[in-house]
Each structure stands twice: as C-alpha cells, then as structure tokens.
Image (tube, grey):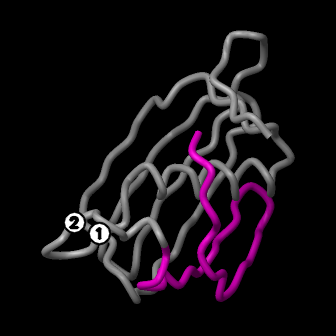
Amino acid sequence: MIKSSLPQILSKSSDGDAIVFRLFIAANLPFFNGHFPEQAVLPGVTQLDWAIRLGCQHFGYPRNIATLEVLKFQQLMLPDSEVTLEISENKAKTKLIFRYFDGDKRFASGRLALATDSTHFSEAS
C-alpha cells in the first residue's frame, strides 16, 4: 500500500459492524499534484489506501490484504469536496466492504479480503 496522509475527518459514527466517516477532501492534499493538469482528481489508489487504513484501524486488523475482490470507481472525487466513507465488516469471512458517496452520488466501492495466513500483500510500517 502507499503511504498517504489521511484527509480531515469531519465526523465519525459507528454501529456494530459498520463505521461511517464524513471526510473533507482539501485541495491542498499532495495527491492532487499532477493528477491531472486540467482538473485535479483524487487518485483511486489514495481512496483505496484510506479505506484500508481506516477500516483496519477501526476493526483491529493488521493492514494485510489478500485480495481486492471488487473495486469500482464510479465518479471523480474533486478538491474541496465532502464525501462519506462507510466501511463494514464481514467478520466470518474476514472482509471489509467500503463505499464512498455523497447522498445519491456514488464515487467508489470495494470489497477487500484480509490475509489470515502468510500469503498476503502487506504494508511495511
């Protein structure tokens, strides 16, 4: 995984198997530099990194991802916007499910299988 700083967290709420963050995507985040010159866009790899970091931290998993089972990017995340990130856990299958949205607008979603053995991708600390 990449090493990125997290965005500003405006609010956070939890109800058992899910956590919901309201995020502010500031225009001065370094991820916008050069991605793209005509219109800055938050890279998908940054969105994925945030979901992994926040999900693993909340649910107490090490950041060891076995597979990205589903990953969809529906709309662009632009500078100076607010989005909601919802992350839920399927504890029985050791999976995290995430989605970025704002009302009816869908930005990205995915399902991550977490490694439970030595065969995994790992982020060095």
Where residue 72 appears, x then y in whole percent? 32, 47
Q: Quadrant of the N terminus?
A: top right
- Real-space Cα separation, disc 1 to disc 2, in angstroms: 6 Å
Q: Residues within 10 Å of mark 1 (few under 14, many from 20)?
A: some
Disc 2: which residue: 36
Which label was assigned to residue 41?
1
Q: Establish if 7 lies above or below 121.
A: below
Element under label 1?
Answer: loop
Q: Are marks 1 and 2 in contact (CB under 8 Å)?
A: yes
Name the residue nearer the viewer: 100 or 46.
46
Residue visible at 22% across and 66% down in the picture: 36
Q: Quadrant of the C terminus?
A: top right
Residue visible at 66% across and 81% down in the picture: 9
Eye-nearest disc, 1 or 2? 2
Q: Establish if 102 lies above or below 93.
A: below
**Residue type at numbered disc 2:** Phe
Residue 11 shown in magenta: yes
Name the side, left or right, on which 62 lies relative to 72.
right
Element under label 2?
Answer: loop
Q: Which portion, as a residue range, is magenta?
A: 1-29
Q: Establish if 67 lies above or below 98.
A: above
Q: Residues within 10 Å of mark 2 (few under 14, many from 20)?
A: few
Name the residue nearer the viewer: 113 or 16.
113
**Residue type at numbered disc 1:** Val
Residue furthest to the left in view is 38
Residue visible at 30% across and 53% down in the picture: 73
Where residue 11 appears, x then y in whole percent? 69, 86
Residue visible at 38% across and 53% down in the picture: 44
